[in-house]
Structure formats: structure tokens, C-alpha cells
Image (tube, rainbow, N blue to C red):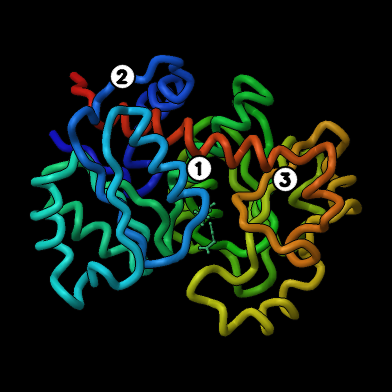
Amino acid sequence: MTRHFLDVDDLDVDEIEAVLAEAENPAPPQVLARRGAALLFEKPSLRTRSSMEVAVAQLGGHPITIVGDEVGIDTRETAEDIARVLSRYHGIIGARVFEHSKLERLASASSVPVVNMLSDDAHPCQTLADLLTLRQQFGNLKGRVIAYVGDGNNVCTSLMVGATMQGMEVRVATPPGYAPPTDAVERAADRGEVVVTEDPFVAVRDADAVYTDVWASMGQEAEADRRRTEFAGFTVDDALMEGAGSDAVFLHCLPAHRGEEVSASVLEGPQSLVWQQAENRLHAQRGLLSWLLTEHE
Ligand code: CP
Ligand code: NVA
């Protein structure tokens, strides 16, 4: 059966365990030997593009990256027709899209795994790297607390679900009107403890990890000025990190805007794991692709 990875809970807890273990395999199996990997980007990317291309190469495959309107999902041809054709050349299809439904339609017509490389709703590859980073720091994550401060966006929703699947308590602090979607909160709350608040200091109290992301995501550039005003008080700075405690780590999916969602002092400070976290995009995705392309009982 072809498995797809459109959000983190497309895998169960044991399957995520297997992916994270495979991420640390020093001898990655050549599951993509003599095969391509089609990587479609409707939005810009630094980390995801580079780490996916290298992961594919490390698994013996050949990445073909297609950016912008070159393919024209639903403009030049339908998502379904694109998936049918690309499945005949490639071992996997990765896509970064605006509407999440485009991923679902690619998956519905694809005979090879489709991987979400970020949509407006979810960023599950990021979550795998985040979990890997947290496990490298803390070992077993059961009972640990992660606080997400900022916009209840794609990164937040996948993180909430992925972290509760690891047994973590998740606390999310957003300004009014920017809470994560109810459906994501419910999916996370079904698996563990979730607190949604409008007070960042409540969220970070005694947390093991503090996470933030940009206030205006790709596609929301026109809202950036308004959001800067509405997110005042939600910067992860030294005062907020003090509320979390000296052993807490700081995470950010990047790109970062110093002076907005995070101060330069926290991003560059001793609690920050952001560069290790960025490196882990490569290892986590290599583990994911390897798992998706291996037969399981
Ligand atoms: N974190 C992340 O997905 O970065 P890019 O947008 O650069 O791929
Ligand atoms: N929320 C951000 C994440 C970037 C990796 C965006 O969607 O632009």
C-alpha cells in the first residue's frame, strides 16, 4: 500500500518512532537507487529544498526540483494528471503548496508516496526534525513541556499534534484571533495535554522548550505590518526565556526575523538549538523517505 505523509498523524506513534530511528541510521539504504524524486515548490524554500535534495541523493536517488509556475498545479494541468505522470518517473513526489487540498489530490492520484513539504495548513517534515532535535536534547519526551509562542499557523499545528504524540504537554500562546485551528487543537488534545492561551508568560512557565515562527507566513506578506502591531508582546526575548527556566531550549523553524518573533540574543544565545534543528531537517527527511519506500507488514 502506498503511504503518504501529508501531516504528522498520517503515521502512528510506532511509525514515527521508526522514522526517527531511521533518521540516525549511519548507512542509509539505497531505496531510491536509479529513481527520481520530484520536488514541486509553489513557495520559496531554503532548508526544505536543500535538505530534501540531499536526502534523496543519500538514498541513491536523483532529485528534480520544479519551482514556481513551471508545473502550474491546476493552471497548466490538474493536480491529479501531474501526479499520474510524475509517479511514472519518480519514487516519491514532494510538494510545497498553498492549499492543503492540492496535496490530498496529488496523493489521491499518485502511485508513489506524496510528502508535504509545507502547505498553508501543515508542516510535518519540520515537526519530524523538531522531535528529533528535542530527543537528542532530552531523550524520552514523555512529560516534557513545549511552549509555542506566536502565530497558530502551519508549523504550530503540526508541532502540536506531533509533540502530544510523543507524550509532551503543549502550550500555545497567540494574540487574540491567531489561535491554531480548532481541528488541530482537537487532534492534539485527543493525544495529550494542550493549553491554548493569550499570555506568553503562562505558556512558557517551567517549559522545557520554547518555539516560535514568523508572524506573517509565506502568502501573508500583505498582512505583515498589521501583524507586527497585533503580535506586540509576543517576541521570544530574554525576559520570556527567563520565565521558562535556564535549562529550557529555544527552537525556530527558520527563516527568523530578529526583533520580531525572536530577539537576536535568544536566537544566537546558549539556549538556542536552531542550527542543529535545521540540520535535522536532512536526517529526519532521509529517515522518512527511507521508511516510506520500505515495505512494512
Ligand atoms: N523551515 C523551513 O521549512 O524552511 P524553508 O522555508 O527555507 O524550507
Ligand atoms: N509559517 C511559515 C513557515 C516557514 C518555514 C510559512 O508558512 O511561511
Q: Secondary structure at mark 3?
A: strand
Q: Is residue 29 left or right of residue 49?
A: left
Determine the CA span between mark 1 and mark 2: 23 Å
What is the number of the mark on residue 197? none
What is the number of the mark on residue 29? 2
Residue at the spot of label 3: 210
Residue at the spot of label 1: 127
- Find out whether the residues at labels 1 and 3 contact each other: C-beta distance under 8 Å: no
Q: Secondary structure at mark 1?
A: helix
Answer few, some or many: residues within 10 Å of disc 1's Cα (few below 14, many 20 plus, some between 14 and 19): many
- Residue at image point 51% right, 49% down: 47
Which amino acid, mark 1? Thr
Chain-order first, disc 1 or disc 3: 1
- Residue at image point 88% right, 35% down: 246
278 to 265, vertically: above or below: above
Q: Position of residue 242 (x, y in %)?
A: 89, 45
Chain-order first, disc 1 or disc 2: 2
Q: Position of residue 241 (x, y in %)?
A: 84, 47
Q: Is residue 185 visible?
A: no
Answer few, some or many: residues within 10 Å of disc 3's Cα (few below 14, many 20 plus, some between 14 and 19): many
Determine the CA span between mark 1 and mark 3: 14 Å
Disc count in the image? 3
Q: Nearer the viewer, residue 208 or 25?
A: 25
Q: Position of residue 206 (x, y in %)?
A: 81, 38
Q: Is residue 183 left or right of residue 163?
A: left
User: Is the residue indicated by label 2 positioned so its CB lies within 8 Å of ligand 1?
Assistant: no
- Residue at image point 44% right, 44% down: 125
Q: Is residue 277 left or right of residue 187?
A: right
Chain-order first, disc 2 or disc 3: 2
